[in-house]
Every structure is written in structure tokens, then in C-alpha cells.
Amino acid sequence: MRTIDLNADLGETVDGVPTADDEAMFAVISSANVACGGHAGDAASMREAVERAERHGVAIGAHPSYADRANVGRVRHDPPPAQLRASVRGQLEALRAAGADVRYVKPHGALYHAVTVSPEQADAVAAAVADVSAALGRALPVLGLDGEIARAVAAAGLPFRREAFLDRGYTPTGALVPRGQPGDLLEDPDAVAARAVRLAVDGVVDAVDGTVVDADAVSLCVHGDTPQAVAMAVAVRRALASAGVRVAAAW
């Protein structure tokens, strides 16, 4: 039986208000990317995410970002590498301090995209993950798209794991359509479920222009704050089961 991980960005509280239905999402995913204070979240929301993960048998990943709560981490910054390294390391340590057994790391938002093209930022993030890995005594995998981050993670002696997105549009080059542009989001649960099966079985996805893009991945992402996120995740689980694909954490 084929196996695939299903992840979602959760624990994202802004001014104490959650951006997703975390309780419902934790019940259907296998891995949660938990906001750890950079773009959203605080000690209380992190502890709540840890409790939910334990109750539902979900693996916890750290979801660090630029320290930019005003823009929810969705605007690119260019901090000095040492500053970025320290910021990301601090966010990972904050999630551990909340009781999380951190199994992997997935950068958030603008940082996620920046590390695919910026060697300096990719190296800084990889170094931060290596710092925390050394403290843990085990190598934390980094989840993301191909690019500079894959190189930097390998150079740091860490595992890199590739993911694909169920609710975001793809360009013909395999990048994500920027938010706010036509085709950036998928909102139909049935279409998202069909995409999940194709990704899990064939490792490909259709770009916005119809180009078939290689997207072989160990983990599939549904954003918790996407409209219809819960319905999408439920439809994905049902479709994968019907296709003979088991959902399980990849860490």
C-alpha cells in the first residue's frame, strides 16, 4: 500500500484569534506545521497545539518565519544571515519549550519561498535547524520545495523532504502561483481530492496552463486557513483511502 503524509499549517493565532478550525483539522491530518511565534502563535497556542497533536496522534513540525507578525510572515525580508539563523533557532526552541516533540521543520510564507532562491537565507535556515538538531541528538528533516534550501540542508547533513500543495496553483516551472494572482487557490474539495490522488499515485500536478509538472513528494499540504479547508481535508482522506493510499506521518 502506498503511503503519503498530509500536513496543514496550524496553531496560527493572531491577537489570540485562530485563523483555522484547528480541532477539526487535527482530526484528519497526519502532520501539523505549528506556528512558533514568528508570524503568529504564542506560548499558549503552541501548548494547545501540542495537546491536540498528542490526542489525535499527529506529528508536530516547527513552522518558523520572518519575525513579522504585522504581515503574518507573507512579506519577504532580507535580514543578516546571523540574525535570521538566531530568529529561526529561537522559534524552534520556543516550540520545544511548549512541550513539542518536534519531528521536522517547514518554513512559513515568504521565508518558505525565499529559501528556494536565496543561498544566504537557505544557509541561515539550515544552520538554525542544524543547531537544534545537535541539541536534540537527531537530525531534523526540512520540508519544502526544491531549490537552494535542498542544497543547504544537504550541506548541513540534514534530510530534505519534498512536499506538494493541494490547494495552491502551480506555474509551469513548478513554483506556486503568487497569492492574489489568477489561479492562486483551489477551493473545490472534489478537485483538491482528485489532485491528491494523482500526486500520491503518479507524482504529478497540472499547472494553471495545463502543463503537467513533476511534483513527487512525501507530504501533501492543505492550508488550514484556506476556505473549505476542513471539507478539503476530509475529501482528500476519503479519496486517498478509495485509491488504496494510506495517510501517515513521514517522520
Image: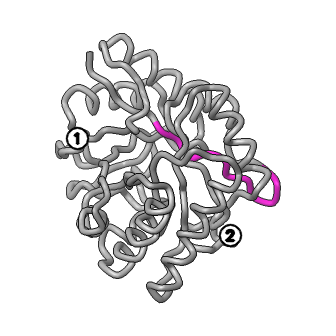
Residue for point 69% across, 36% down: 21
Residue occupied by mark 2:
69
C-alpha separation, residue under disc 2 versus residue under disc 1: 32 Å
Residue 11 falls inside the magenta stretch = yes
Which residue is more in the foreground, 63 or 179?
Answer: 63
Q: Answer with left or right where residue 46 lies relative to residue 104.
A: right
What's under tag 2, amino acid-wise?
A: Arg
Which residue is more in the foreground, 251 or 18?
Answer: 251
Residue 15 at x, y percent in the picture: 81, 60
Crowding around mark 1 (Cα neighbors within 10 Å: few <14, some 14 to 19, many 20+) is some
Residue occupied by mark 1:
216
Residue for point 59% across, 33% down: 228
Label drawn at residue 76: none
Residue 177 at x, y percent in the picture: 37, 57
Q: Write down the region rendered in magenta.
A: 7-17
Q: Answer with left or right where residue 16 lies relative to residue 54.
A: right
Q: Answer with left or right where residue 26 lies relative to residue 144.
A: right
**Disc 1 element:** loop
Q: Main secondary structure of the magenta part?
A: strand
* Residue 88 seen: yes
